[in-house]
Image: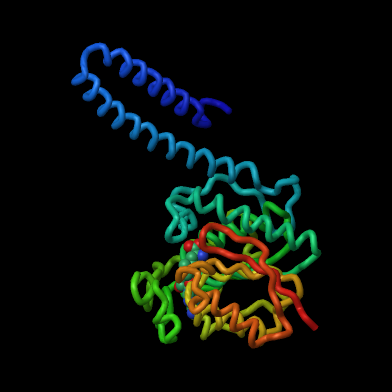
Amino acid sequence: MSQSDGSGVIRRVVRGVHRRLSRTASYTKKGVRAFVYDRTSTVASLSRDIRLLERRIESLSSQLAYENFGAVDGRTTPGTRTYGTLKPHDITRQPPLGYHSAIEARTIYKPAFWRGINFLFGNAIKGPIVEFGCRTGFTSRCLAEAIVERNLDAKLYLYDSFSGLPEISSFIDQSAPEVREQNVWFDGSMAMPAGTPKAISDSLEEFLAPSRFEIVQGYFSDVLPSRLPKEKISLVHIDCDLYSSTMEVLNALVVADLLQDGCLLYFDDYNCSRANPKYGERRALIEFLGANTHWSASPFISYGWHGQGYILHENI
Ligand SMILES: C[S@@+](CC[C@H](N)C(=O)[O-])C[C@H]1O[C@@H](n2cnc3c(N)ncnc32)[C@H](O)[C@@H]1O
């Protein structure tokens, strides 16, 4: 790793830390006051250094993630190419709500998506990958990268109103802690600026041909099932928070006959609402399986504190 890669900065900071620690030790001889004063300033300056280091590590890690992973075995599927460092203004840099940093979120999402794609490869399950709930496109981009990195020949479909949550009219959603107590989910919460679909598209076009993905803007009630893919899907990432939105998605997938044995259903908000099965995505899955008895599901992956992926089984 060269100095310009950032190791120089890290070495400088570590040397500074050593210097300060040895200075602190020698000051102890000068009396308690000097020692206390110096400890305080040392702690302040160490905290600054740690923040600096954290920033460097974050930027180095994302650089490595972007530079080294494009097409892991050197091949690419048609319509893809390797990608470089994510640009500072890229909208898809903004991590999902609740995450401290983009790198923290990446370390959760990328392995979860890789594992899903590996499962699809291993079991020869083909078909588009679909996301419901994109907001800034952070997870959309993670999915797109995973597709390229694993050489998956699948098209990516992305669905969101980009105007935030719809009107919360279901009593089940109105009773959820996020609505009733925390006030984080409300009509229009998480609305994005007008240019968001285009900005996400620009980010993905860096390495995916426009024919390899589609962004569908609109409330699910307006765009489903008519704008769904025409072939059976392989992986669905459901990140739309509400019980009612999740039910709309699952019902639309059944009506359009897009589910297949072995396809993966990821529920990003599975453990929201304190993981209480009375609410949210958990309840939607229970009701969906209760009403569609020819489908059953077994747990596949748990990611972050919030997400849960399932493998869907056809019972007939
Ligand atoms: C938690 S955000 C998604 C976060 C995103 N995956 C990310 O990487 O940041 C939930 C999204 O679901 C969308 N959404 C929820 N219900 C919807 C519905 N019925 N129709 C369209 N979009 C919906 C909201 O607009 C919001 O952008």
* Residue at the limit of the structure toward the left, as seen here: 33
Does residue 23 appear to the left or right of 4 in the view shown?
left
Please report the residue visible at 70 percent of the width from the left and 59 percent of the height from the top. 117
The quadrant in which residue 127 appears is bottom right
Residue 151 is at least partly visible in this image: yes
Q: Residue 120's x, y, as percent? A: 74, 63
Does residue 259 appear to the left or right of 183 in the view shown?
right
Q: Quadrant of the N terminus?
A: top right
Please report the residue visible at 50 percent of the width from the left and 76 percent of the height from the top. 280
Q: Residue 258's x, y, as percent? A: 70, 79
Residue 211 is at least partly visible in this image: no
Between 47 and 65, the one lying in front of the other is 47
Please report the residue visible at 71 percent of the width from the left and 83 percent of the height from the top. 257
Between 167 and 179, the one lying in front of the other is 179
Between 181 and 166, the one lying in front of the other is 181
The quadrant in which residue 139 appears is bottom right
User: Looking at the image, is 37 positioned above or below residue 289?
Assistant: above
Does residue 282 appear to the left or right of 256 in the view shown?
left
Between 203 and 109, the one lying in front of the other is 109
User: Looking at the image, is 206 positioned above or below residue 185?
Assistant: above
Please report the residue visible at 23 percent of the width from the left and 24 percent of the height from the top. 36
